[in-house]
Amino acid sequence: MSSEYRIDLVVLQGTPFCNLNCTYCDLSRESRRTRILMAPELIERSFREIFESPFLGDTLTVIWHSGEPLTLPIAYYDDAIGLILAIRTACGRDDIDVRFDIQTNGVLIDEAWCAFFVRHAAHLDLGMSCDGPAGMHDAFRRNWSGRASHAAVVRAFDLLAAHGIAPKVIAVVTDRTLDDPDAFFEFFWERRAQIRGFHFNALADGGAAADPALNYDTSDRERYRSFYRRLIHLATSHAGHDDAFEIGNLTHGLRRILAAGDADEPEAQATAPLQSLNIDANGFVTSFYAGLAPDAFPERYEGGVTLGNILDTTLQEIAGSPKLSSIARDFERSRAACAAACPYFGVCPGGFELTKLARHGDFDGSETPECAIHVKALTDALLDDLESHAADSARHRVSA
């Protein structure tokens, strides 16, 4: 068991149930129809283990995710936040700065929820999912009866803004987004005063969706590069009007390019054991990636990637478990293969290890469609922009 592990993020699945039936959801249809909740006893056991462990730094983020959190009562979160903070004090760990986060589809936000967000504003952040204009959003984000959700999400933006609450936004990129990047950008630009941050995602697994509009492979790399280039152009051309509007992917990608070769490798951080500790509504613990099903990859790891159930396995036992060591060795093997073969390794944020296993059946390869789309195409687009600015600067110096 190693005390070198550090828990920075705890992802809690308050419930797997969701009021929407999004086409691309990572959770199974069955789990999203299951009305269970993480019991207070499970929260108490989890955080006693966490705060009594040697694995904490100065800060800890606790996020409710994987399922729709707002399908549970407001009182559930009032009680849960109070309980977690009380356990921190009881364990003598008030030196740790604890922040909370809720990731929601926004459909259920009303005045009562706004009052809750305001009440906890000092230590609670809010994230919302929205895929852009109605045509992009409603194609894949509908409820179980097939009704569109975009109008409700826009109402939520307006209601939150009226209460001074600005959420972070995550948008999923699909074929519809690629076809009209201008409309995608303008939707969020027009709402820039209502949001605190904006991040877009291509699906984590580009070959798993039943709908072809959600899938991609390496042959789509140039298409995504063009999409990213257009977003960069739009963001740059609008920057003078509001420097505060930032697209997280572009900013983070540029930082990785500028920091390439530094000893503090983001790829290594992304797959550090226990850095992200995920606890589902039944108490099963996984690490590395939020939303990872505990029974995933049973052919590689006996019983799947779950590291145990926190109700009957201590965090110390999880940290010292042969399975965690085995997964960590596999991930290190994966990183070594990428470091040896991939020229983009120095700018890769990581997180493709299990995708590589699913695609290739092992950890020895380097490129997958996911890293080609998420990392290589984005890096190429950012380098295109940097080279363009350098060329313009050179021409200006010559003409002067």
Image (cartoon, helix red, strand yellow):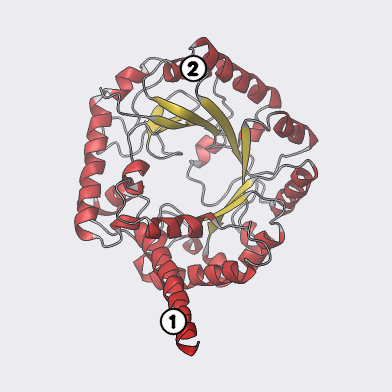
* Residue 12 shows up from this direction: no
Name, please, the residue furthest toward the front: 400
Amino acid type at circle 2 is Arg
Tag 2 residue: 93
Q: Quadrant of residue 347?
A: bottom left
Tag 1 residue: 394
Q: As displayed, is residue 77 above or below residue 162?
A: above
Q: As displayed, is residue 188 above or below residue 282?
A: below
Name, please, the residue furthest toward the bottom: 399
Quadrant placement of the N terminus: top left
- Please identify, in this view, whether the residue under mark 2 or under mark 1 is nearer the observer: 1
The location of residue 116, given as percent across then percent down, is 72, 30
Q: Secondary structure at mark 1?
A: helix
Which residue is drawn at the image coordinates 44% and 81% (left, top)?
Answer: 394
Which residue is drawn at the image coordinates 25% and 48% (left, top)?
Answer: 335
Q: Secondary structure at mark 2?
A: loop
The location of residue 178, given as percent across then percent down, is 53, 68
User: Is residue 324 toward the left or the right of residue 145 in the image?
Assistant: left
Amino acid type at circle 1 is Ala
Mark closest to the chain's N terminus, 2 or 1: 2
Which residue is drawn at the image coordinates 50% and 24% (left, top)?
Answer: 96
Task: Classify 10 Å Cα crowding around label 2: few (below 14), some (14-19), many (20 and above).
Answer: some
Camera-nearest residue between 77 and 213: 77
Q: Quadrant of residue 128?
A: top right
Q: As displayed, is residue 312 above or below residue 194?
A: above
Q: CA distance from mark 2 to mark 1?
A: 55 Å
